[in-house]
Structure formats: structure tokens, C-alpha cells
């Protein structure tokens, strides 16, 4: 197991000391998920929630590796980011509902029906059935062609679903009256955008989020940390793929983050519904405390 963890840390380009995080926190979590799966209908849907840059995808990847290695589980990993509406669909939504919906991210900009269809297909898959897992290409700000989607064969033991707002509950409508930042104050003066987002959380997103059976929350220390981490994330993406229509400057990211601010603050205060494990992070991404429901 030590060699598996060491290889995974190296493959993800993480510092060698990250092995301690995996051993101390991720390994026990994988053991809990394995135990939970024994009395839950397959596949067990595990949710990983956290603001931008909290390490959701890293945790999801390592959990998949550990579950395969420790229990020979078949694991499917799906990101909420891969369920974004196509660019054309978001532009149309921006024209018909509100211009801010042209920007991907908030509830209302995902194809949750597609997400539910994928979960249904995985839950009922025969041994030889192939299920395509959606992919979104952030570098071009559009859904990847279906021919490029990866496939999983058969029914998985565990589905890991990760996303920044996964499990978020709707706010009281009265909380929407006051703008959360300058973007809301100047570009959503009548509150129509935030009301639409909140209504999505009350309806289709709640039904989708309720599919999660084991919820994990990566809790950022502050919105300032979220901004710094998101900018670092974009720098890494640019270094990997180069410039493109979906690559943002630091100033663009600062504005972009304001789309997420209201719901991020709501999650930091309230946590995702039905959270069973909460990793409390410090400014350096380290886990400083673990809370169990």
C-alpha cells in the first residue's frame, strides 16, 4: 500500500510529504466508505464538496485509487464540472433568463438531468454494459465531444461525485435581498439571477444532490483563501494547455469568483446537507481538523 500511495502522490505532482495526508486522513476515510458500502445498495454514491481549490478532485482521485487497491472495488468518478451545459445552451439561457447565466458555475448552469441519467445507467448496468462519463473542456469552455468521454464497464461499487456546490441547500428568499458583492450589486440589481439560482437549488438540484449517500465536505478557511487557490489552479491549467478562450487572468478570476461567493459563504456557514465527514483546512491546504457526524 505504501508504494501505491507513493506512486499516486508522484503521479499527481504533489510534494512527498502529502503521503502523510493520505495515510492519516484519506486511508481511514476509504476504510469507512468500504464499511458503509457493505450495507448500502450498489453503487454507493459518495459526494465530495468544497470551494474552488480545496482539493476535491485530488481527494476523489485518491479515494478511487485506495478503494480499488484495498477492496478491489470498481469505481466511477464524476465531477459536477463535467455536467456543465454546453456553451451554446448557456448563451441561450443568458439571453432568455439572465446574462450572468452565460458564465458557468452556479446552479442553473449544469445539466443535472444528464447527471441523473448517468447515475441511473451506472446503477442498472449489466456486467458488459458500457456507460459513458461526461467530460467538459474548460480550456474551450464547452462540453467535450461524446466520442472523447471515457467509459466504465459494468456496475460500479462506488460512484464518487465531486463538485463545489454539491449538497448545497437553498437560502431563505429573504437572504437574497442584500447583494453579496459588487457583481451582484451592479449586474443583478433586481436579484433575478440569484433568485433563479436559489430556485434551482430548491428543485432539480435538490433531487440530484439527494442521490448522494455519503457526503464529505472540504471546508476552506475563508473566501480570501478560495480566491488565491482558484488563481493558482488557473495558473496550472494555463501551464498545461496554454492560452485558450477558457483561460482567465487573475483579474478575470477575481470577478469570476464573485459568481460563486454567495453560495460559497452559505456553504461555509451551513455545510452541505447530510455531511458525514468534514475536513477543516488551513490557508496552506493542510487538514487541521476532521469532524464526523
Image (spheres, grey):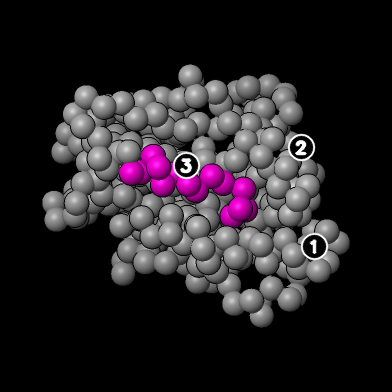
Q: Would you place residue 51 above or below residue 102 in this image?
A: below
Q: Which residue is mark 1?
A: 188
Q: Which residue is mark 2?
A: 249
Where residue 206 appears, as percent x and y from the top left, is 46, 62
| Mark closest to the chain's N terminus, 2 or 3 | 3
Where residue 180 appears, as percent x and y from the top left, is 73, 68
Magenta stretch: give its range: 106-120
Q: State the SS at label 1.
A: loop
Q: Residue furthest bottom?
A: 174
State whether residue 267 appears in this view. no
Judge depth for marks 2 and 1 and give the one in front.
1
Q: Quadrant of the N terminus?
A: top left
Where residue 278 appears, as percent x and y from the top left, is 39, 62
Q: CA distance from mark 2 to mark 1?
A: 23 Å
Q: Would you place residue 109 above or below residue 146 in this image?
A: below
Judge depth for marks 3 and 1 and give the one in front.
3
Q: Which residue is mark 3?
A: 114
Amino acid at each position: 500500500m505504501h508504494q501505491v500511495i507513493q506512486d499516486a502522490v508522484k503521479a499527481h505532482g504533489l510534494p512527498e510529504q502529502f503521503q502523510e495526508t493520505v495515510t492519516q486522513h484519506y486511508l481511514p476515510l476509504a476504510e469507512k466508505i468500504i464499511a458503509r458500502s457493505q450495507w448500502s445498495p450498489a453503487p454507493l454514491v459518495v459526494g465530495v464538496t468544497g470551494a474552488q481549490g480545496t482539493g476535491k478532485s485530488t481527494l476523489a482521485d485518491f479515494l478511487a485509487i485506495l478503494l480499488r487497491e484495498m477492496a478491489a472495488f470498481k469505481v466511477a468518478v464524476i465531477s459536477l464540472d463535467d455536467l456543465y451545459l454546453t456553451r451554446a445552451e448557456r448563451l441561450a439561457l443568458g439571453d432568455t433568463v439572465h446574462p450572468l447565466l452565460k458564465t458557468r458555475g452556479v446552479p442553473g448552469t449544469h445539466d443535472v438531468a444528464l447527471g441523473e441519467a448517468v447515475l441511473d445507467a451506472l446503477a442498472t448496468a449489466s456486467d458488459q454494459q458500457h456507460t459513458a462519463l461526461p467530460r467538459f473542456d474548460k480550456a474551450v469552455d464547452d462540453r467535450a465531444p461524446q466520442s472523447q468521454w471515457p467509459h466504465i464497464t459494468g456496475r460500479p461499487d462506488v460512484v464518487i461525485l465531486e463538485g463545489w456546490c454539491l449538497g448545497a441547500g437553498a437560502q431563505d428568499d429573504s437572504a437574497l435581498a442584500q447583494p453579496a458583492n459588487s457583481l451582484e450589486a451592479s449586474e443583478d440589481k433586481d436579484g433575478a439571477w440569484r433568485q433563479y439560482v436559489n430556485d434551482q437549488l430548491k428543485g432539480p438540484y435538490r433531487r440530484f444532490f439527494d442521490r448522494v449517500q455519503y457526503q464529505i465536505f472540504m471546508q476552506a478557511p475563508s473566501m480570501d483563501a478560495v480566491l488565491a487557490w482558484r488563481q493558482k489552479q488557473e495558473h496550472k491549467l494555463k501551464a498545461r494547455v496554454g492560452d485558450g478562450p477558457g483561460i482567465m487572468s487573475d483579474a478575470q478570476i477575481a470577478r469570476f469568483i464573485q459568481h460563486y461567493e454567495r453560495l460559497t459563504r452559505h456553504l461555509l456557514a451551513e455545510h452541505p446537507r447530510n455531511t458525514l465527514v468534514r475536513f477543516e483546512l488551513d490557508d496552506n491546504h493542510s487538514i487541521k481538523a476532521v469532524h464526523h457526524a
